[in-house]
Image (cartoon, rainbow, N blue to C red):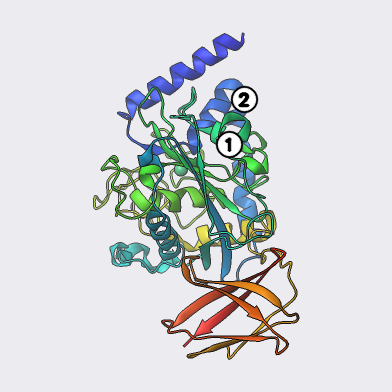
């Protein structure tokens, strides 16, 4: 029996990939398809749940404030060949790309067509490389691990084993406190069928129970070619490039695809949001005035510029306000530990002046040997210094920092850590 199920699953995947011409894409829906093959009736249950959820979206009231939530990110670079061990510079530019999209400040915002300008959303979510690791020690948020596995691809074209140290991958850092992103190679018989994928938060609206996996599996898995801006590794020209991760993090916060994974029908499933027009299927091209579903009065074309569609870079340029509302609601209710500051284990420091200009004075509670690491808003190292603090309990750093927000991380001789945010003018 088990063999038959596997056969059916494989057949389905083969058909699906043949149909899409091996176009590289997100694998989040393939997982649902897999479940439907494995558990007959899954699709029907999913449909019913989504219909109920449509009513519930009206009730969302959390997240409607101006607070900017900052999410610590860890990139697990699980590499076998040199190419897979992508440089820090690509990771930094990927964090930039995430922030530019989640704050809607990238260079392509003008590509939003006039008809959709009124519904563009600023998610007010920002990302930074974690500065404190799960052990309370300083980290640069980039966790590199050389593995003996040259390709983590499984029978579904996914790479789930990368999340397990028992399978020569890397275990998640506390998934309640960090957004885990695994970067590796995973293919389907040597070809990339799925660029990247992610799972929604447990109990997220518009998904059914069968879609939920344990929290330690809920980060993003992405092929190494699709991380960062101008990644030099060969990639499909029809890919979303650095916005691949923008799309996947959208799933991580509970967004569905804009076409709700329908196969050439307008009725039935929806992503649950009113400001994303109905469409019959994924769009892979931008600029075309597709309008695959007539919604009657107020009908709008397909929103090919949405990050949760499939159009190639740089076509996808926006989230809608309801997508933002849903992500923020999910963040506050289902991932509520994720934006809280990482644990502070060392006694307090105070930094002055803050806002700073020129020298920065740090006052300590105890004498001792300390290391200071200064990072910018996305977690890139800016400065590092070791010093002794004597009876005056203070240390002055001479800086010539550009204006912006920085984080001072102080480690003492027992490897205890404290962190302070500073604004430089
Ligand atoms: Zn997707």
x and y percentages locating residue 132 in the rendered image: 62, 61
Rendered-image quadrant of the N terminus: top right
Q: Residue at x 32, y 34 (%)?
A: 23
Q: What's the distance in space between the residues labelled 2 and 1, CA to CA?
A: 10 Å
Q: Residues within 10 Å of mark 1 (few under 14, many from 20)?
A: some
The answer to whether 169 is drawn above or below residue 156 in the figure is below
Is 62 left, or right, of 186 in this rendering? right
What residue sits right under mark 1 in the picture? Answer: 47
Dot placed on the residue nearer the N-terminal end, 2 or 1: 2
Is 313 left, or right, of 6 in this rendering? left
Q: Residues within 10 Å of mark 2 (few under 14, many from 20)?
A: few
x and y percentages locating residue 351 in the rendered image: 62, 85
x and y percentages locating residue 208 in the rendered image: 64, 38
What residue sits right under mark 2 in the picture? Answer: 41
Front in this rendered view, residue 196 or 364: 364
Front in this rendered view, residue 418 or 58: 418
């Amino acid at each position: 029996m088990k063999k038959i199920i596997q056969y059916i699953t494989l057949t389905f995947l083969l058909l699906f990939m043949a149909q899409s011409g091996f176009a590289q894409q997100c694998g989040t829906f393939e997982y649902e398809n897999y479940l439907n093959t494995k558990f007959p009736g899954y699709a029907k249950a999913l449909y019913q749940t989504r219909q109920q959820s449509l009513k519930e979206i009206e009730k969302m009231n959390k997240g409607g404030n101006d607070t900017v939530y900052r999410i610590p990110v860890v990139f697990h670079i699980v590499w076998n060949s040199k190419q897979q061990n992508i440089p820090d510079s690509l990771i930094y530019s990927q964090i930039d790309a995430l922030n530019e999209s989640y704050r809607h400040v990238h260079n392509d915002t003008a590509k939003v067509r006039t008809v959709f300008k009124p519904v563009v959303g600023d998610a007010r979510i920002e990302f930074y490389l974690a500065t404190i690791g799960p052990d309370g020690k300083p980290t640069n948020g980039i966790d590199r691990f050389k593995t003996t596995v040259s390709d983590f691809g499984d029978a579904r074209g996914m790479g789930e084993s990368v999340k397990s140290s028992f399978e020569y991958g890397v275990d998640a850092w506390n998934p309640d406190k960090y957004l885990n992103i695994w970067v590796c190679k995973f293919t389907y018989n040597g070809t990339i069928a799925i660029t990247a994928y992610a799972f929604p938060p447990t109990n997220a609206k518009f998904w059914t129970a069968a879609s939920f996996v344990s929290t330690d599996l809920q980060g993003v898995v992405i092929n190494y070619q699709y991380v960062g801006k101008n990644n030099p590794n060969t990639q499909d020209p029809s890919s979303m490039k650095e916005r691949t991760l923008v799309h996947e993090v959208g799933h991580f916060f509970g967004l569905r695809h804009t076409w709700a994974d329908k196969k050439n029908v307008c009725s039935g499933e929806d992503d649950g949001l009113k400001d994303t027009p109905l469409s019959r299927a994924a769009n892979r091209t931008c600029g075309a005035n597709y309008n695959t579903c007539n919604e009657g009065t107020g009908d709008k074309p397909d929103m090919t510029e949405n990050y949760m569609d499939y159009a190639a870079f740089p076509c996808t340029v926006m989230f809608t306000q309801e997508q933002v509302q849903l992500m923020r609601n999910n963040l506050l209710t289902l991932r509520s530990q994720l934006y809280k500051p990482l644990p502070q284990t060392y006694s307090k420091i105070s930094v002055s002046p803050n806002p700073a200009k020129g020298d920065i004075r740090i006052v300590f509670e105890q004498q001792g040997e300390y290391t200071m690491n200064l990072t910018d808003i996305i977690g890139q190292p800016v400065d590092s210094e070791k010093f002794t603090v004597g009876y005056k309990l203070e240390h002055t750093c001479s800086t010539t920092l550009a204006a912006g927000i920085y984080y001072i991380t102080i480690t003492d001789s027992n490897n205890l850590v404290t962190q302070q945010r500073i604004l430089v003018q």
